[in-house]
Image (spheres, helix red, strand yellow):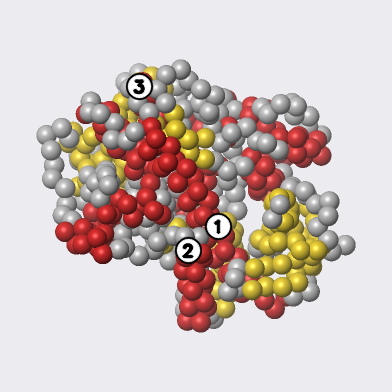
């Protein structure tokens, strides 16, 4: 999942994937209990302490200051999941006389509400990320902040950090800037409706039709995103398709696991967020400021990726090479789009997870983002949801103001490690709840055999994802010789929704 390595957040993860079964009280209670227990087991703190509650009660909207540019008249809009309320970013684009495009990405100024070392800030660092279980969202910051005071809600003035990128006609960046402003989101849009319209599969969304100039604005944004994507691909950035299992209910029971895929609107936002995060990393480097970078190192299991490519008649270089891998993936997407998601899953698992590291001022090092073909990459576009982004926002604001950095290098190192560890824990919690929902679906199919793809082989065991329904579980018997990317047959032997367990054995 490229977005899980780079994007502001999973654009599809936050879909309320259990909404279809919310009418069944027993299931909701069970899954809610599973989610909260998983949070506690992974040492999250879902509740505020007394000091944080007291601070929250005293919060008031921030005052405008003279250093803020007034950009409220621009036709800003946001695109997110239809049910999302914690809106971190808004976008605007305009055509230039020479054929170029001026792209603006506005990021919620969370730091203006949540001060460093305050009780709320300490709570945010303890969790370091929002956790999207499907049953409920456990926000890094209280909803009064993340969906209220700092969320870029439609028709509400907000203080934002603006990332400005001037693109030449071919998409090549000509200049960039970062500054503070006040802006207004004039249209809250949704991925599914905008995506289907951009792809010619659905009508023009009502809010777009009712907002003068917004249709042309979105087509311009789409063109800018396409130019940015093309440049990344030429540099060797990897493009994947991904699958997210979405339980579907009928009469209070889980009937199936639907699949949600990327679309053109999701790609648009991902392209903009990648570009914005690159600008932020470059800006801090130019200002000779320490920063937290987001990196995905060269894959340790490149040899397995080479083996998988060889089964398709493609010889990849012996040393990890993003450009060659992207060429292979692009060819496979064109030849077999229906099975490309399975191939994507295998490669993503072999690439390994991203992590946060500290980048010190001085000569560039070799810590880049393999999946994005980017040597400069930060996380800065989701400060309501990720603590690394909030810290980066404070670093950028200090650089803009010309004031000393708010963190020492030692503090940044501690924060980077914490954010990596908490992100991994959040992913674990989310997997448990998804597996609990899948266990409910599969409970009456013990003994059935399924086609599956191997998604993980490590010291903890061998893991597979069924092709239909796309449920994930562990192979406890007959797993010898299985490796990531292989198609296998497995037999369901046990489910435990309360613990999020789905167990299989190898089948002939």
Label 1 neighbour load within 10 Å: few <14, some 14-19, many 20+: some
Residue 489, horizontal then vertical, whole percent: 81, 60
> Which residue is disc 2 drawn over?
39
Position above or below: 231 against 204: above
Disc 2 vs disc 3: Cβ atoms closer than 8 Å? no
> Which residue is disc 3 drawn over?
288
Any part of residue 174 in sight: yes
Position above or below: 443 against 332: below
Mark 3 and mark 1 lie on one chain; the one further toward the N terminus is 3
User: Residue 327 vs residue 273: left or right?
Assistant: right
Closest to the observer, 345 or 404: 404
State which quadrant residue 247 falls in: bottom right
Measure how far apart labels 3 and 1 are at the Cα level.
36 Å
State which quadrant residue 143 falls in: bottom left
Element type at mark 3: loop
Label 3 neighbour load within 10 Å: few <14, some 14-19, many 20+: few
User: Residue 294 vs residue 261: left or right?
Assistant: left
Residue 78, horizontal then vertical, whole percent: 34, 47
State which quadrant residue 321 falls in: top right
Measure how far apart labels 2 and 3 are at the Cα level.
38 Å
Residue at 67% from the left image edge and 42% from the top image edge: 350
> Which residue is disc 1 drawn over?
428
Residue at 65% from the left image edge and 46% from the top image edge: 349
Mark 2 and mark 1 lie on one chain; the one further toward the N terminus is 2
């Amino acid at each position: 999942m490229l977005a899980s390595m780079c994007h502001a957040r999973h654009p599809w993860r936050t879909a309320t994937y259990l909404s279809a079964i919310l009418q069944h009280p027993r299931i909701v209670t069970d899954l809610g209990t599973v989610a909260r227990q998983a949070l506690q087991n992974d040492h999250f703190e879902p509740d505020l302490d007394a000091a944080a509650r007291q601070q929250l009660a005293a919060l008031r909207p921030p005052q405008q200051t003279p250093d803020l540019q007034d950009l409220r008249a621009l036709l800003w809009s946001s695109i997110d999941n239809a049910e999302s309320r914690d809106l971190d970013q808004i976008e605007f684009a305009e055509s230039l006389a020479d054929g170029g495009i001026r792209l603006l990405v506005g990021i919620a100024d969370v730091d203006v509400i949540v001060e460093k070392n305050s009780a709320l800030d300490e709570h945010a660092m303890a969790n370091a990320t929002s956790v999207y279980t499907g049953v409920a969202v456990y926000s890094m910051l209280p909803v009064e902040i993340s969906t209220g005071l700092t969320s870029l809600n439609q028709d509400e003035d907000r203080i934002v950090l603006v990332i400005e990128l001037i693109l030449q006609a071919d998409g090549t960046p000509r200049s960039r800037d970062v500054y503070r402003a006040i802006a207004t989101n004039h249209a809250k849009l949704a991925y599914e409706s905008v995506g289907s319209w951009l792809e010619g599969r659905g009508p023009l969304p009502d809010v777009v039709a009712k907002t003068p100039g917004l249709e042309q604005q979105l087509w311009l944004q789409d063109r800018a995103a396409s130019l940015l994507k093309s440049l990344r691909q030429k540099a060797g950035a990897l493009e994947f398709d991904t699958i997210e299992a979405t339980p579907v209910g009928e009469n209070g029971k889980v009937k199936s696991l639907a699949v949600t895929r990327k679309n053109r609107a999701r790609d648009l936002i991902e392209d903009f967020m990648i570009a914005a995060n690159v600008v932020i990393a470059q800006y801090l480097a130019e200002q000779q400021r320490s920063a937290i970078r987001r990196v995905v190192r060269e894959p340790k299991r490149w040899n397995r990726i080479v083996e998988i490519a060889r089964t398709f008649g493609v010889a990849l270089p012996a040393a990890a090479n993003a450009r060659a891998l992207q060429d292979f993936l692009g060819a496979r997407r064109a030849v077999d789009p229906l099975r490309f998601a399975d191939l994507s899953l295998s490669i993503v698992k072999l690439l390994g997870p991203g992590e946060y590291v500290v980048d010190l001022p001085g000569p560039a090092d070799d810590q880049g983002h393999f999946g994005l073909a980017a040597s400069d990459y930060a996380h800065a576009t989701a400060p309501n949801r990720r603590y690394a982004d909030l810290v980066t926002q404070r670093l950028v604001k200090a650089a803009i103001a010309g004031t000393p950095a708010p963190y020492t290098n030692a503090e940044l190192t501690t924060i980077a490690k914490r954010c990596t560890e908490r992100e991994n824990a959040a992913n674990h919690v989310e997997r448990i709840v998804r597996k609990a929902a899948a266990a409910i679906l599969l409970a009456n199919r013990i003994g059935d055999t399924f086609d599956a793809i191997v998604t993980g082989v490590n010291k903890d065991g061998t893991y597979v994802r069924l092709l239909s329904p796309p449920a994930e579980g562990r192979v406890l018997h007959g797993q010898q010789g299985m490796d990531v990317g292989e198609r296998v047959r497995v037999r369901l032997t046990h489910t435990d929704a309360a613990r999020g367990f789905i167990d299989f054995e190898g089948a002939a």
